[in-house]
Image: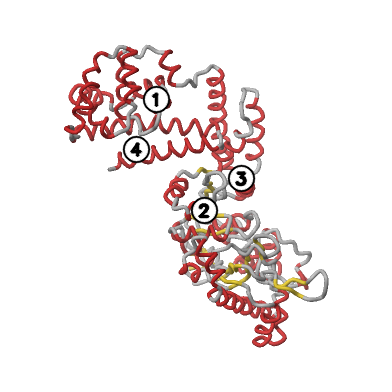
């Protein structure tokens, strides 16, 4: 620590109080973050940890304190020794306990003044934005609503360096020099002058969880502005990129209430996600998410969902986040990922009125374990059985990152089972078991009674897909049909209501009539000829009854949903990320969603 001063708040921010008590002080902490008080004897735990506010309180003896006092009391050591013990556990190296000093009053005063200066700058920038039609128009064009411009206190840096310095100097006197420690001003390479790095940019104020302005991000909106598209303030007395989060002040309460946090890449993404109801969304600040930020979020919720951009950078961010997450994740905490279409981000989907599509993608998010398999599987375009050893080696890389033994064991079991499935998949593929519709028709005797029934049910129920015949796997259908709990009722439906159901479905779903007629003629389905001839005449006169609805739901649940989910699993197992495969996967996921809605009606 500089100047022999220790920032006690920094040390506390790097550890979770209840976990520290359990892992480093040997306390028996219950899952509800309580323990029997160490000060007075008791059988029922009355000491409660508040990890968010970083203190504990015993409702029995009224003893309260923070991580340092708890360490002092349990380890029977001095205050300075307690600081060193906690700091070492947090990875902060301190050479000796004897040169430790609490933050001096001068140091604290500087931080308080800097908080105030940054807050004043935020107000200046916001006022200037509301007076600048071009900057306002840019944000509104990007889909940001005016009330969210106000809510996030967005701004515009239009004033000159001297104008800003004069305003701050007039209010803070000589303390205006703290501006040069704020990260907003930087010393020129060509002179001793300082310049505003945010000049002529849209400003995104960064607040801490207490609502204090700690830094700013600036974005180009005018082509004539030089420099990178985004620029962030450098670290300062009150700001650390690896610890602060954009949108934290507005999201933290919703993260806690929903028990879930969403991480996106960009500031605009955060705002747009908040606009459609995901008010538990935050973003890292120009860098990959850090282990400190993940730990912090996990103290407020159990699940973190990452919604990274659908590009190479987003893919790399996903891999980096998985690797960091595995090293610190504990049982009961979860990390999942949302796969977006290529070259899209949350903001672009929302502004295109595709928020319904985005929400469906979020519903289909995948946990780290599944994403690891995708990452590895996509390396092999035409996988062979010889690749299994390489896949296993890559999986071990991720397994070795996991420190929690319970999670490590479950991941190992999951990977072992998936490796067996992958081996089976490769073998079947090489033996041409994954055939198309035409091949399957040639392979089996479709006039056999069981296939006759299966084919008929496919025509009636299966899909609103174009070219739906390409989705049929007869062997799979036969297996599902034979195991179906609804089989007797399906056959009863066939006897009692066949004609009505058949004609009704020509009205309800888009069936390729020419394909059906050709197939019936080809395979001699004489028993169905009358129904085909009468179908078009009776479409308008058919009405569904309760029996039909009940049977249809049973079929949807036991057959259609199984088929669709099997197709989804096959695609995900292969791990393809090309455009056409993603399009087909989205179509299948949409179909599964529709089926579930019908079943639940």
Sequence order check: which comes first, mark 1 or mark 4? 1
- SS for dot 1: helix
Looking at the image, residue 108 lies above or below residue 69: below
Work out how far the residue at label 1 is from the one at label 3, CA to CA, in angstroms: 34 Å
3D distance between C-alphas at marks 4 and 3: 31 Å
Earlier in the chain: of badge 4 and badge 3, it is: 3
Say which quarter of the image contains residue 81: bottom right
Q: Indicate which disc residue 315 carries.
A: 3
Judged by depth in the image, the label closer to the viewer, 1 or 3, is: 1
For the residue labelled by badge 4, is the local secondary structure a helix, a strand or a loop?
helix
Which residue is label 4 attached to?
Answer: 595
Viewer-nearest of discs 4 and 2: 2
Which residue is under mark 1?
Answer: 469
Nearest to the eye among marks 1 and 4: give it.
Answer: 1
Which corner quadrant of the image does residue 574 belong to?
top right
Question: Which residue corresponds to the image point at 77% horizontal and 72% vertical from the top-left?
Answer: 187
Residue 214 in percent (x, y) is at 62, 71
Residue 289 visible: yes
Q: Callout 3: 10 Å neighbours few (<14), some, many (20+)?
A: some
Q: Counting residues from the N terminus, which is met first, the one under dot 4 or under dot 2? A: 2
Q: Is residue 403 visible to the viewer in this orientation of the structure?
A: no
Q: How has the structure been colored for display?
A: secondary structure
The x and y percentages for residue 65 are 57, 70
Q: Distance between the residues labelled 3 and 2?
A: 17 Å
The residue shown at (53%, 64%) is: 139
3 or 2: tag closer to the N-terminus: 3
Label 2, on which residue? 348
């Amino acid at each position: 620590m500089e100047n022999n001063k220790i920032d006690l708040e920094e040390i506390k921010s790097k550890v979770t109080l209840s976990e520290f008590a359990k892992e480093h002080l040997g306390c028996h902490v219950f899952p509800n973050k309580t323990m029997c008080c160490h000060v007075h004897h008791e059988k029922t735990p009355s000491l409660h940890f508040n990890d968010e506010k970083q203190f504990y309180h015993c409702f029995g003896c009224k003893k309260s304190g923070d991580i340092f006092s708890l360490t002092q009391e349990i380890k029977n050591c001095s205050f300075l020794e307690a600081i060193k013990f906690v700091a070492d556990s947090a990875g902060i190296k301190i050479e000796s306990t004897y040169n430790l000093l609490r933050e001096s009053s001068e140091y604290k005063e500087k931080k308080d003044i800097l908080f105030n200066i940054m807050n004043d700058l935020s107000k200046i920038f916001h006022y200037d934005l509301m007076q600048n039609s071009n900057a306002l128009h840019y944000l509104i064009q990007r889909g940001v609503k005016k009330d969210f411009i106000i809510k996030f206190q967005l701004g515009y840096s239009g004033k000159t360096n001297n104008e800003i310095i004069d305003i701050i100097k007039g209010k803070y006197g000589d303390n205006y020099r703290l501006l040069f420690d704020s990260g907003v001003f930087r010393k020129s390479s060509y002179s001793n002058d300082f310049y505003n790095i945010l000049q002529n940019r849209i400003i995104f104020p960064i607040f801490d969880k207490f609502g204090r302005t700690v830094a700013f991000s600036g974005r180009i909106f005018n082509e004539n502005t030089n420099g990178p598209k985004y620029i962030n303030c450098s670290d300062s007395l009150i700001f650390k990129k690896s610890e602060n989060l954009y949108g934290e002040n507005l999201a933290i309460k919703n993260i806690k209430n929903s028990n879930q946090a969403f991480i996106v890449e960009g500031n605009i993404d955060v705002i747009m996600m908040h606009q459609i109801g995901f008010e538990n969304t935050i973003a890292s600040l120009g860098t990959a998410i850090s282990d400190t930020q993940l730990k912090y979020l996990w103290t407020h919720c159990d699940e973190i969902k990452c919604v990274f951009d659908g590009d190479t950078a987003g893919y790399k961010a996903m891999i980096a986040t998985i690797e960091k997450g595995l090293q610190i994740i504990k049982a009961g905490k979860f990390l999942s990922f949302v796969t977006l279409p290529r070259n899209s981000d949350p903001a672009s989907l929302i502004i295109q009125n595709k928020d319904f599509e985005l929400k469906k993608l979020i519903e289909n998010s995948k946990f780290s374990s599944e994403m690891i398999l995708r990452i590895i599987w996509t390396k092999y375009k035409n996988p062979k059985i010889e690749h299994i050893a390489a896949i296993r080696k890559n999986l071990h890389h991720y397994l070795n990152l996991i420190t929690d033994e319970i999670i490590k064991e479950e991941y190992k079991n999951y990977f072992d089972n998936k490796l067996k499935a992958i081996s089976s998949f490769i073998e079947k593929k090489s033996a041409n078991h994954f055939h198309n519709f035409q091949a399957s028709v040639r392979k089996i005797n479709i006039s056999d009674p069981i296939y006759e029934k299966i084919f008929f049910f496919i025509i009636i129920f299966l899909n609103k897909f174009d070219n739906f015949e390409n989705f049929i796997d007869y062997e799979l259908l036969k297996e599902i049909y034979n195991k179906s709990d609804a089989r007797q009722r399906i056959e009863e439906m066939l006897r009692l209501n066949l004609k009505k159901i058949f004609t009704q479905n020509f009205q309800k779903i888009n069936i390729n009539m020419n394909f059906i007629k050709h197939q019936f003629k080809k395979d001699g389905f004489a028993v169905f000829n009358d129904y085909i001839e009468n179908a078009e005449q009776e479409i308008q006169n058919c009405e569904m009854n309760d029996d039909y609805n009940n049977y249809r739901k049973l079929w949807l649940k036991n057959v259609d949903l199984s088929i669709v989910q099997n197709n989804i699993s096959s695609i995900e197992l292969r791990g393809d990320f090309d455009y056409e495969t993603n399009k087909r996967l989205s179509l299948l996921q949409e179909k599964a969603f529709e089926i579930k809605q019908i079943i639940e009606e």
